[in-house]
Image (cartoon, rainbow, N blue to C red):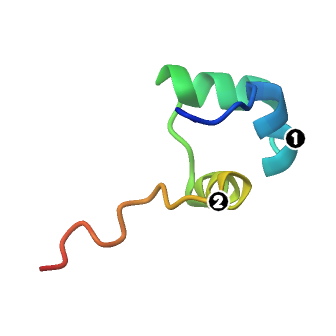
Amino acid sequence: MRGRPISNRELARLAGLSHPTIGSALNGDRYVDLRTLANLEVALGVELYPVRMYER
């Protein structure tokens, strides 16, 4: 969310998640499942999962 003027509540709304879920994930108190990660990627318009991490 760095560099983006978006609140936790707005991100939660865009991703179809609760704002406590967003807060817990951002604080590192909770792991997110792949569905949640995909929802966050769509809401933010960025790739969060390191798909190309092992490509050469």
Q: Is residue 17 left or right of residue 39?
A: right
Q: In this view, does 29 lie above or below 15?
A: above
At horizontal 65% and vertical 22% (from top left) the residue drawn is: 23
Q: Find residue 13 and name its label.
A: 1
At horizontal 48% and vertical 55% (from top left) the residue drawn is: 48
Quadrant containing the C terminus is bottom left
At horizontal 55% and vertical 27% (from top left) the residue drawn is: 26
Horizontal and vertical percent for residue 35?
Answer: 65, 60
Q: Find residue 36 and name its label.
A: none
Q: Find residue 45 and name its label.
A: 2
At horizontal 78% and vertical 49% (from top left) the residue drawn is: 15
First in sequence: mark 1 vs mark 2: 1
Please, what is the three-letter code of the amino acid marked with disc 2?
A: Gly
Furthest toward the bottom, the residue is 56
Q: Quick one: label 1, few (<14), some, or many (20+) residues within 10 Å?
A: few
What's the distance in space between the residues labelled 1 and 2, CA to CA?
Answer: 14 Å
Q: Is residue 38 above or below residue 16?
A: below
Please, what is the three-letter code of the amino acid marked with disc 1?
A: Arg
**Who is closer to the viewer here, 11 or 31?**
11
Mark 1 residue element: helix
Is there a contact, CB below 8 Å, between mark 1 and mark 2?
Answer: no
| Callout in the foreground (1, 2) | 2
Horizontal and vertical percent for residue 18?
Answer: 82, 33
Quarter occupied by residue 5: top right
